[in-house]
Amino acid sequence: MNPRIDLNDLRVFHVVAQKASFSAAADALSVSAAYVSKRIRLLETALDAPLLYRSTRRVAMTEAGERLYRWAEKVLDDMDQLVDDVSGVKRAPRGTLRISSSFGFGRHVVAPVLARFVEAHPQLDVRLDLFDRLVDIAAEGYDLDIRIGDEIAPHLIARRLATNHRILCASPDYLRARGVPQRVADLQAHECLCIKERDHPFGVWRFVDDGDDVRVKVRGSLASNDGEVAVQWALAGRGVILRSIWNVRPYLDDGRLVQILPHATQPADVWAVYPSRLATSARIKACVEFLAAEFAQAGWARAAQSAPGDARRRLARVR
C-alpha cells in the first residue's frame, strides 16, 4: 500500500531541514519542539525510511532525507502556487523564492534589499544564487532573475525595476597621462579594461552616441571576468572602464573616477524577469514591488537620470 503523506508533515520536515534544528523549526512554525519531533516521526514511519540524523548540536539529512527535501521544495512550491492562482483571499506571501542575479549587482545591491524583504515577509524564504552568465530561469529552476540589460527573451515576463546605463570612466591620473578621448573611435588608442560577464560580447563596446548606435572594438593589457577587479584597475589609473552607474557612482562623487564621452552611454536598465507560469504568484509580485520601491530610492538610480552636462563639468576640471 502506498504511504499517505500529510502535507503539513512535509512542510515541517522542509523547515527542519532548512534550519538544521528542531527547536529553530519549532520557533519558525510557532509550535512546540515536541510537535515537530512527532510530525517527523510520523513522516519517517509513513515512508519507512530515516530522514534525519539527530545530534545534540544539529540535525542533518540522510540520503533519503535529501531526496525528500528536493521533492518537498517542488511539492510545496506547487501547492503555494496553486493557492496563489485560485484563491480570491488576500494572504501574506509564503514559501520559497529562488532568485538569481549577476555577481557584482547581486552582491552589492540585490542582497541587502532581499535581506530587508525577508524581514518584512517572515513567511518567505529566499535563496539567492549569483552567476557570471545568463541564467535560463525556467530550465534551471529559478523563480526570478534580477538582471541588467534590455535583451530579454519574449517568452519571459519582465518588469523594469530601475533606469540604468553604463558609462565610460577613467581616473584623473590616467586622463592626464594619456589624454581625454573626444570621440568613441578614440577609445581604440586607449587602454580599455575589458570584462567578460554574463552575455556581453568580450572586447566589443556598444553605445548610443547622441542617438546613433555605435560599436567599437577595444583592447587593453588587462582584462578580467570580474567587474570589481576592473574597477580597482581603473582606480589605479590603468585604463578606461565601461561600468554601470550603480557600480561607479561613489567614485564619481569623490572624484577618483571621471566620466568621459558623456554623450555615449550603453542602456542597461535593471529588470525583474520570471517565467509566465508565475505571472499570478503572490511571492513574485511582493518581491518585485519591494525591489522596485527600494531601487527607486537608491542614489545610483537617481544618478542614472542626471544630465550629461554634469559629467562635462567634472571632466573640465581634469583638463
Image (cartoon, rainbow, N blue to C red):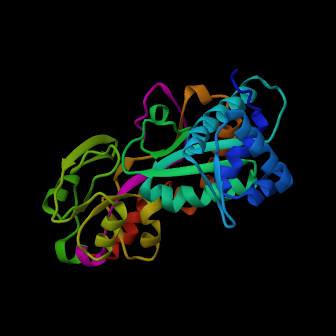
Question: Toward which corner of the image does residue 47 lie, by quadrant?
Answer: top right
On the question of residue 297 being in view, the answer is no
Magenta stretch in the rendered image? 150-174
Q: Give the x, y percent position of residue 134.
A: 39, 42
Q: Which residue is drawn at 84% across and 53% down?
A: 34
Q: Residue at x 42, y 47 (%)?
A: 268
Q: Does the magenta stretch include residue 17?
A: no
> In this image, 21 relative to 220: left or right?
right
Q: Residue furthest left?
A: 189
Q: Give the x, y percent position of residue 225.
A: 29, 57
* Vertical comparison of 121 with 142: above or below: below
- Which quadrant holds the C terminus? bottom left
Question: Toward which corner of the image does residue 42 lie, by quadrant?
Answer: top right
**Observer-nearest of 256 and 280:** 280
**Observer-nearest of 164 and 140:** 140
- Which quadrant holds the N terminus? top right
> In this image, 255 relative to 240: left or right?
right
Q: Give the x, y percent position of residue 174.
A: 24, 74
* Vertical comparison of 296 with 289: above or below: below
On the question of residue 204 being in view, the answer is yes
Q: Give the x, y percent position of residue 189.
A: 13, 61
* Vertical comparison of 142 with 125: above or below: above
Q: Which residue is drawn at 61% across and 34% down?
A: 74
**Observer-nearest of 91 and 179:** 91
**Observer-nearest of 117 and 158:** 117
